[in-house]
Amino acid sequence: MTKPTVGLDQAATVPRSTSTPRTRRAAEAAQAAADDVPPTVSAPRRRERAAGARRRDLTLFLIGLPALLVLLVFNYLPMAGVIVAFKDYDPTEGILHSKWIGWQNFHYLWANGDAWRVTRNTVLMNGIFIVANLVVAIGLALLLNEVKDRSPFVSRVYQSAMFLPFVLSYVVITGFVLTFLNADTGIVNHLLRSVGGGGVDWYNSPNWWPLVLTLVEMWKGVGFWVVVYLAGIISISPELYEAAAIDGASRWQQIRSITLPLLRPLVVINVLLGLSHIFNADFGLFFQVTQNSPTLYPTTDVIDTYVFRSLTSTGDVGMAAAAGLYQAFVGFVLVVAANWLVRRRGDDALF
């Protein structure tokens, strides 16, 4: 008797019928993993890809090379000059051959007691500027955003008007300030006298100048920060506001719960950058606008103006270099410390 033959299809199905469900699942998983493995790339293909990546990186490097050179020439190479802060600099002998005096330049900077006054004025005024510009700029940016939704043309006019003082020099702004604060012909004294008050000798009244300088600095610089924060507000997705409006949120609730939290990273970065310059006062603001009046020194004399007067009167380059190194070092420490605190509390740190 002949045995019945089994077809190929039947033979192929016999092992599957005897396999367990666990075995089938393992086989299916192995087949799926094998399907996901990319084909092996040949060596010539890998070399071609690497060459393409090098060409791309070289192109990007050449694009950024001019900026890197500017950064190197104006920011890093001059750092070698800090050695002057520790020497009794003599132009005839040069930097390297001038007498080494160690910390004497720093001692002179602090010995006469003026350094504490100018440091206090520098930190206090720059701190006021940072807070005032931040609050006013965010407030105006929120208002401009509301105007933009109703009248884009009017919003652009307001932006231009706010930004215009930013491009003016402090020499021009000094003329505006004199127009308002001149003791005899100033607009402010005319208004005070018209309501029965007495005029103020502004350039001999140091107690008024923290307020005056804050108003002048805001009028000149706040327009730039308004544009920055307005750009940040515009970049927020409109869908978030639409969803909040559907849920019944008022406009103020949308600002408090959507706009301000999403602006936080931008605010943190700007504040950290501001802290990095808290020991560097704007020379034009404190020297030009105040007319370098000696009677205003108790509240308006800052490190930059003090070093400038010392350098022009004594010609001591070493002391000026010591003051500059002191400013840079303390600013660096403040930025690192502030960034560390921000990083401990969230993910909005600068680095």
Image: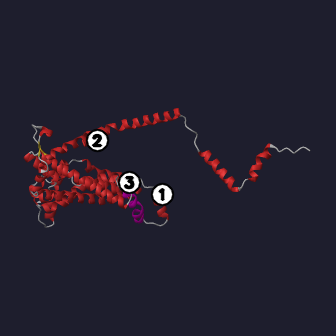
Q: Residue at x 24, y 53 (%)?
A: 331
Residue 294: x, y in percent?
A: 9, 55
Tell me the magenta residue range: 252-265
For this view, does 316 lie left or right of residue 235? left
Say left or right for 291 vs 263: left
| Mark 2 neighbour class, 10 Å CA radius: few under 14, some 14 to 19, many 20 or more | few
Residue marked by disc 3: 232
CA neighbours of label 3 inside 10 A, class few (<14), some (14 to 19), many (20+): some
81 in relation to 116, above or below: above
Calculate the distance from the C-alpha at mark 1 to the C-alpha at mark 2: 41 Å
Q: Amino acid at mark 3?
A: Gly
Which type of secondary structure does the marked residue at label 3 adopt?
Answer: helix
> What's the mark number on residue 239?
1
* Residue at disc 1, secondary structure: helix
| N-terminal-most mark, 1 or 2 | 2
Q: Position of residue 302 (x, y in %)?
A: 16, 55
Q: Is residue 332 visible?
A: yes
Label 2 sits on a secondary structure element that is: helix
Residue 262 location, quadrant: bottom left
